[in-house]
Amino acid sequence: MSMMKEFREFAVRGSVVDLAVGVIIGGAFGKIVESLVQDMIMPVVGRLLGGLDFTNYYLPLNNQGTTLSLVEAKKAGAVLAYGNFITIVINFAILAFIIFQMVRLINRARNMNPPPPALPAKEPEDIVLLREIRDALQK
């Protein structure tokens, strides 16, 4: 089997195509969740905590001042941007929760249409015959 033919069979296999579609949709979905957290949730959380903006929280590592924005501080040298880390952790938690809810709904949809019950297996003829003999003897 030539390498090209083998590659073609691998590339068009259903699981590979499904994985590719999943990765593409997952990337787009990740951007949606990132926007949800950064543009909708973090401003509300920051407001509830007294007007804090997590994205500009950092520890300077090169003696830059803490009054600079994160972008300016990064230009001046290395910083430990823990506010950005908090945002990413919240992104992950929300994404994991949403995926969990989606899987729950899919599992419920699958369970709504259970497979039809299996028909009872036909009893072997010797068992039926023995029961008939037993019943006849009891009479």
Image (tube, helix red, strand yellow):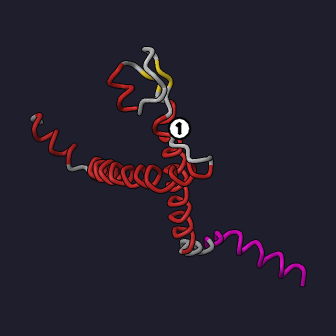
Instruction: Tell me: 120 left or right of 102.
Output: right
Between 51 and 11, the residue placed more toward the observer is 51
**Quarter occupied by the N terminus:** top left
Between 65 and 75, the residue placed more toward the observer is 65
Instruction: Tell me: 134 left or right of 99.
Output: right
Q: Where is residue 44 drawn, in percent x and y? A: 55, 54
Query: Where 74 falls versus 104 (above or below)?
Result: above
As for residue 87 lying within the magenta part, the answer is no
Q: Residue furthest bottom?
A: 139
Where is residue 5, by image quadrant? top left
**Quarter occupied by the C terminus:** bottom right
The number of callouts visible is 1
Q: Residue furthest top?
A: 62
As for residue 125 lying within the magenta part, the answer is yes
Q: Where is residue 43 drawn, in percent x and y? A: 50, 52
Q: Which residue is mark 1?
A: 86
Between 120 and 70, the residue placed more toward the observer is 70
Instruction: Tell me: 112 left or right of 17.
Output: right
User: Element under label 1?
Assistant: helix
Residue shown at 49%/41% (left/top)?
87
Residue shown at 33%/48% (left/top)?
27
Residue shown at 79%/76% (left/top)?
133
Where is residue 4, by image quadrant? top left
Which amino acid, by three-letter code, is at mark 1? Answer: Ile
Q: Where is residue 37 drawn, in percent x and y? A: 47, 51
Query: Where 101 falls versus 10 (above or below)?
Result: below
Query: Where 3 falls versus 49 (above or below)?
Result: above
Q: Where is residue 134 drawn, in percent x and y? A: 83, 75
How packed mark 1 is, by other alpha carbons closer than 10 Å (few <14, some 14-19, many 20 or more), is some
Between 33 and 108, the residue placed more toward the observer is 33
Main SS, magenta residues: helix
Q: Which residues are magenta?
A: 121-139
